Amino acid sequence: MTRDIFTQAYGAMRHDLRKLCSPCSAWPGASPRLCCCWPTARALHAQFATSGTRFGATAVGIYPGRTSQQAGGNKAGAAVRFTNEDIELIRNVVPLAKHVSRTGELQGLIQNGSRTFNMQVFGIDPSLGDIWALQLDEGRFLDEADNLSHSHCVVLGSEAKDKLFSGMQALGQDVRVNGVSFQVVGVLKPRMQEGDSDDNRVLYAPYNSTDTLRDNHYLTGIWLDSIGLDHTKMTKSIRGALALQHGFKPDDERAVFVSMP
């Protein structure tokens, strides 16, 4: 998922995968979003440990991978793909989670007049703003009305705003994402980032609105906040429920990754 979609943890994870992922070259029709050589849970935990404060102290990320064990009649190597049904499943499994959000990520060609850049675009539910502790600098954040109406609006990361608009006004202006127009409704304050991370060079759009940009039937990941919850028990419950839903063994750590700061 690029060097971030959502985040440095997920991004760094994907970046490292491409260096290790020789088997994917042998997989016909392989997609970077369904890489078969996903990282270990330990590696993902390490990424969260160094950047948890940027996500929100109670943020929990859940990402699909590929099975590494046979389960029933299913062979190892099957891709796990999340849908909206998994969102409802997570809400039932973790009823005390205050916020739950879908994420869908793509690398987009972003244009404002003659200015053109490749940037990461996150399709999200509005609750991700609370889960990731995103802070507005100007304008407003996305809301449920935007999602329900499939509104073509975006919130810009601070660096994305600078690149696309320099010192000019961004609010109310249109940018094009892979040729599709989206109106800027908000700009975020800079987020803490490390090294060459592009956490601030991103755009956030309503999840439902990105159906013009990607196949929204499949989620890139799921995020929730875990305040007051026992992480060990929660992780076990999430894995168990998703294993039953997707037909893999609960102890198959490569089938689904559940990580938190």
Image (cartoon, rainbow, N blue to C red):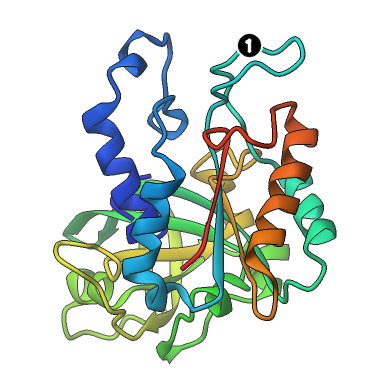
Residue 108 seen in this snapshot: no
Q: Quadrant of residue 156?
A: bottom left
User: Horizontally, is 47 left or right of 166 in the view?
Assistant: right
Vertical position of residue 87 compared to residue 158: above or below: above
**Residue type at the position of mark 1:** Lys
Count of numbered tags? 1
**From what the image shows, is residue 26 above or below residue 180?**
above
Left or right of 7 in this view: 249: right
Q: Nearer the viewer, residue 46 or 118?
A: 46
Q: Secondary structure at mark 1?
A: loop
Neighbor class of circle 1 (other Cα within 10 Å; few <14, some 14-19, many 20+) is few
The residue drawn where x is 34% and y is 15% is 23
Quarter of the figure with residue 93: bottom right
- Camera-side residue of 95 and 122: 95
Query: Is 79 located above or below residue 12 in the figure?
Result: above
Q: Which residue bears the numbered disc 1? A: 75
Image quadrant occupied by the N terminus? top left
The answer, for residue 191, to whether it is visible in the render is yes
Relative to 226, is 195 on the left or the right? left
On the image, the x and y values in percent for residue 218 come to 62, 39
Q: Position of residue 53 (x, y in %)?
A: 40, 78
Q: Nearer the viewer, residue 197 or 37?
A: 37
Residue 131 percent location from the top left of the image = 56, 74
Name the residue located 53 percent from the left edge and 76 percent from the top edge: 129
Q: What is the x, y in percent for residue 164?
A: 22, 69
Q: Residue at x 77, y 15 (%)?
A: 72
